[in-house]
C-alpha cells in the first residue's frame, strides 16, 4: 500500500509541476489517437451508412467481416502493419515505421471496423420506413442520409466513444509499429509499460492517471454532446 | 378537371418472382379523392408507393400528366410536387414546428415563407399550441396531425395517404377524419387514400378502387361500388350493401327525414338538417312485398316502390337487386321468393325500419 501511496503523491507532484516529458507523452497520445479516431470516422461512417442502407450481393458477408474486425487484437494489427511498413515490405519505401504516423495507421485499422460496425447498427435501428417517408416528402438522397445520421446521433456518438476508447487504450500495436522511442513515439500506454518494468511506479501511476483523465475528459465531452437537450 | 394527373400503364410489380401487383391501366383525375380499399396484402400500399414515385414498377409505366415519369434517380423534381403520409407519423426528433417545416426546407423555401406556411398548416390541423413541443412527447393523434400538416404545407399536387388512421383509437380517428374531410373538400387536392376501412373510404372518397390479390377489380363512385360490385370477390369484400346518397331535410325527436332520389325516408340517427349523408342498408334489413299486397302494420316505416332487376341464388338465400330509382339490394329466402311469386321484372315494395340504416356523413 505504501508503494501506491508514495507513487500517487509523486504522480500528483509530477502532474502539478507539469513535467515536460509527461506533457509531451500526453499530447502525443491525444494527437495520435485523436487523428486515428477522426480518420476512422471519415471512413467508417460513410461505409457503415452504405452497408446499412443499400442492398448488394455479398453485403451480409461484408457486415460479418466488419463485425469480426471490431474484435481485431491490436497485436495482430501491429504485426501486419509492421510487415507492410518494414523496410523491405511493400510500403517500406515510405519510411514510416517507428513514427507517430505508423501508430496512427495501426490505430486507424483498429478503430475503423469499430466505427463502421456501430454505424451499421446505429442506422439500422432507425425505423426503415422513416427513409421512405423522407423521400415521400421530397428529400434528396443527401438530405435523407444527413437526416438519418442526425436521427441516429446518439448511437453514433457511442460509436465515436468506442472507437476512441479502443485506440487510446491499446498498447500492442503502438509498441510494435511505434517502437516506444523516447521523445518520438512514446505514448501513454507504452510509457506506462516501460516505467513499470523499470520499477518507476510514481511515473507509471502518473501516466496511468493521465490516461484515465484523458479518456474521461473526451468521453465526458461526447456524452455531454450526446445527452444535450434530452429529458429522461 | 383537366385530364388525368396520374396514370399507370401495363404495370406489374413482382418481388422475388412473385407477382404482387398487376394494373393494366389506371387514370386518376385531377382534384379527385380516390379511396383504395382492399384486404391486407392486396397490394394497396405498393400501388400507393408506385403512384408516389417511391417504388419502381417491375414492368410498365407511371404517367404524370400524360407523360411517362423520368428514370429512377431523376425523380426528385416530380416527387417534390407530391407528399406522402403513412400509417406511422414517422416524425423526427425535434419540435413540432421543425417537423412541419421539414419538406419546405428540403425544397430550400424562403425562411419567411416557411414560417408563414408552417403557422398556417399548424392552424389548419389544430396543432398551433403544440409548436414548441418535442415530438416524442406527443400522443398518437397529435403526432399524426403533425404528419398531415407536414405534408399539407407543401401544397402538393398529389397527396398520398397510406392508412393514416389505422393506428389511432376511434374517437381520435373520427376527429381527424372529419378535419381531413373538410381540408380535402376545401383544397380539392388530388388525393389517393389507402384504407381497409369501408366507412373511411365512403366518407372521403369521390371514387373507390377495390383491390384484391394485386389487381384493381373495380373503380367507380362509392355508391356504385357498394351497390353493384362487379364481381363476387368485390361483393364479398365490400359486403353487398345498398348505399343511398341523400340530404337530411329535417330532424324531429331523433328521427331525421332524409331525401333520397325523390323518396323521403325516416331515419333514426343523430343528424342535423342540411347534412349530406349516405344511407347504408344491409340486405337482411330489407323486406320485400309484391306490389299490391299491403304490408302488415309494423315499425317498418320506410317503403320504396321498385322493380326487380335480377336475382342471384346463393344457396337458400336469393340476393335480389331492385331498381327504386336507385339500386337496392335485398336478401330473401328461396321459400319467400317462391311464396311471394317474385320474378325478375316484378313490381315490388321494399320496406325497412327507421333504425335499420347505417348512416355515414359526407363532406
Image (cartoon, coloured by chain):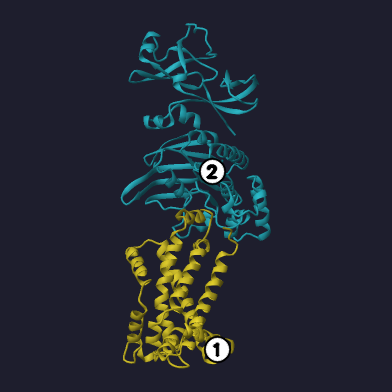
Rendering coords of residue B34 (x, y %)? 50, 39
Which quadrant would residue A194 be assigned to in this image? bottom left
Crowding at mark 1 (Cα within 10 Å: few <14, some 14-19, many 20+): some
Instruction: Name the secondary structure under disc 1.
Output: helix
- Above or below: residue A177 compared with residue B121: below
Question: Which residue is label 1 attached to?
Answer: A14
The chain letter for the residue carrying disc 1 is: A
Rendering coords of residue B26 (x, y %)? 44, 42
Rendering coords of residue B76 (x, y %)? 51, 58
Farthest residue to the bottom: give it. Answer: A182
- Discs 2, 1: same chain: no
Report the disc number at residue B191. Answer: 2
Farthest residue to the front: give it. Answer: A2
Rendering coords of residue B53 (x, y %)? 47, 52
The C terminus of chain B sits in image quarter: top right
- Above or below: residue B48 compared with residue A16: above
Number of numbered labels in the structure image: 2
Which quadrant would residue A76 be assigned to in this image? bottom left
The N terminus of chain B sits in image quarter: top right
The chain letter for the residue carrying disc 2 is: B
Q: Nearer the viewer, residue A206 or B73?
A: A206
Q: Is residue B233 visible?
A: yes
Q: Is residue B230 visible?
A: no
Chain A hue?
Answer: yellow
**In percent of the image, x 50 and y 32: which residue is there?**
B222
Chain identifier, cyan in the render:
B
Amino acid at each position: 500500500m505504501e508503494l501506491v501511496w508514495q507513487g500517487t503523491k509523486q504522480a500528483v507532484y509530477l502532474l502539478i509541476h507539469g513535467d515536460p516529458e509527461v506533457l509531451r507523452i500526453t499530447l502525443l497520445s491525444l494527437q495520435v489517437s485523436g487523428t486515428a479516431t477522426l480518420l476512422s470516422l471519415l471512413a467508417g461512417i460513410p461505409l457503415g451508412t452504405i452497408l446499412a442502407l443499400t442492398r448488394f450481393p455479398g453485403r451480409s458477408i461484408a457486415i460479418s467481416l466488419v463485425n469480426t474486425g471490431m474484435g481485431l487484437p491490436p497485436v495482430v494489427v501491429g504485426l501486419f502493419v509492421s510487415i507492410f511498413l518494414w523496410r523491405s515490405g511493400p510500403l517500406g519505401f515510405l519510411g514510416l515505421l517507428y513514427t507517430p504516423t505508423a501508430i496512427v495507421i495501426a490505430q486507424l485499422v483498429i478503430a475503423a471496423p469499430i466505427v463502421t460496425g456501430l454505424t451499421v447498427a446505429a442506422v439500422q435501428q432507425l425505423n426503415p420506413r422513416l427513409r421512405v417517408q423522407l423521400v415521400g416528402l421530397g428529400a434528396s438522397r443527401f438530405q435523407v442520409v444527413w437526416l438519418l445520421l442526425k436521427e441516429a446521433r446518439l448511437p453514433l456518438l457511442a460509436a465515436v466513444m468506442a472507437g476512441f476508447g479502443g485506440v487510446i487504450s491499446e498498447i500492442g500495436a503502438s509498441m510494435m509499429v511505434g517502437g516506444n522511442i523516447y521523445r518520438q513515439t512514446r505514448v501513454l500506454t507504452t510509457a506506462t509499460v516501460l516505467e513499470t518494468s523499470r520499477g518507476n511506479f510514481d511515473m507509471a501511476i502518473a501516466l496511468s492517471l493521465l490516461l484515465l483523465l484523458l479518456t474521461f475528459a473526451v468521453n465526458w465531452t461526447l456524452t455531454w454532446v450526446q445527452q444535450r437537450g434530452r429529458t429522461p | 378537371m383537366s385530364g388525368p394527373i396520374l396514370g399507370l400503364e401495363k404495370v406489374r410489380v413482382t418481388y422475388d418472382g412473385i407477382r404482387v401487383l398487376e394494373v393494366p391501366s389506371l387514370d386518376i383525375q385531377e382534384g379527385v379523392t380516390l379511396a383504395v380499399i382492399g384486404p391486407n396484402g392486396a397490394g394497396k400500399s405498393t400501388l400507393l408507393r408506385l403512384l408516389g414515385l417511391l417504388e419502381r414498377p417491375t414492368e410498365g409505366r407511371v404517367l404524370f400528366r400524360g407523360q411517362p415519369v423520368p428514370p429512377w434517380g431523376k425523380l426528385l423534381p416530380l416527387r417534390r410536387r407530391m407528399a406522402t403520409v403513412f400509417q406511422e407519423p414517422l416524425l423526427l426528433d425535434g419540435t413540432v414546428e421543425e417537423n412541419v417545416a421539414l419538406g419546405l426546407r428540403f425544397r430550400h423555401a424562403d425562411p419567411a415563407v416557411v414560417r408563414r406556411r408552417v403557422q398556417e398548416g399548424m392552424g389548419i390541423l389544430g396543432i398551433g399550441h403544440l409548436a414548441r413541443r418535442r415530438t416524442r412527447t406527443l400522443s398518437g393523434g397529435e403526432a399524426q396531425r403533425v404528419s398531415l400538416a407536414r405534408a399539407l404545407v407543401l401544397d402538393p399536387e398529389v397527396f398520398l395517404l397510406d392508412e393514416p388512421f389505422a393506428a389511432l383509437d376511434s374517437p381520435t380517428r373520427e376527429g381527424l377524419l372529419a378535419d381531413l374531410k373538410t381540408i380535402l373538400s376545401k383544397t380539392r387536392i388530388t388525393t389517393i387514400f389507402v384504407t381497409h376501412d369501408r366507412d373511411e373510404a365512403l366518407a372521403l372518397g369521390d371514387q373507390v378502387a377495390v383491390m384484391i390479390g394485386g389487381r384493381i377489380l373495380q373503380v367507380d363512385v362509392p355508391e356504385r361500388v357498394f351497390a353493384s360490385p362487379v364481381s363476387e370477390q368485390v361483393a364479398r369484400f365490400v359486403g353487398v350493401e345498398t348505399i343511398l346518397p341523400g340530404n337530411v331535410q329535417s330532424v324531429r325527436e331523433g328521427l331525421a327525414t332524409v331525401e333520397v332520389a325523390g323518396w323521403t325516408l325516416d331515419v333514426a340517427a343523430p343528424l342535423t338538417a342540411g347534412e349530406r349523408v349516405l344511407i347504408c342498408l344491409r340486405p337482411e334489413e330489407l323486406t320485400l312485398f309484391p306490389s299490391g299486397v299491403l304490408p302488415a302494420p309494423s315499425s317498418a316505416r320506410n317503403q320504396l316502390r321498385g322493380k326487380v332487376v335480377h336475382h342471384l341464388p346463393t344457396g337458400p338465400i336469393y340476393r335480389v337487386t331492385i331498381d327504386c330509382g336507385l339500386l337496392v339490394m335485398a336478401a330473401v329466402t328461396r321459400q319467400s321468393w317462391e311464396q311471394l311469386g317474385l320474378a325478375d321484372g316484378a313490381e315490388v315494395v321494399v320496406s325497412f325500419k327507421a333504425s335499420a340504416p347505417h348512416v355515414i356523413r359526407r363532406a
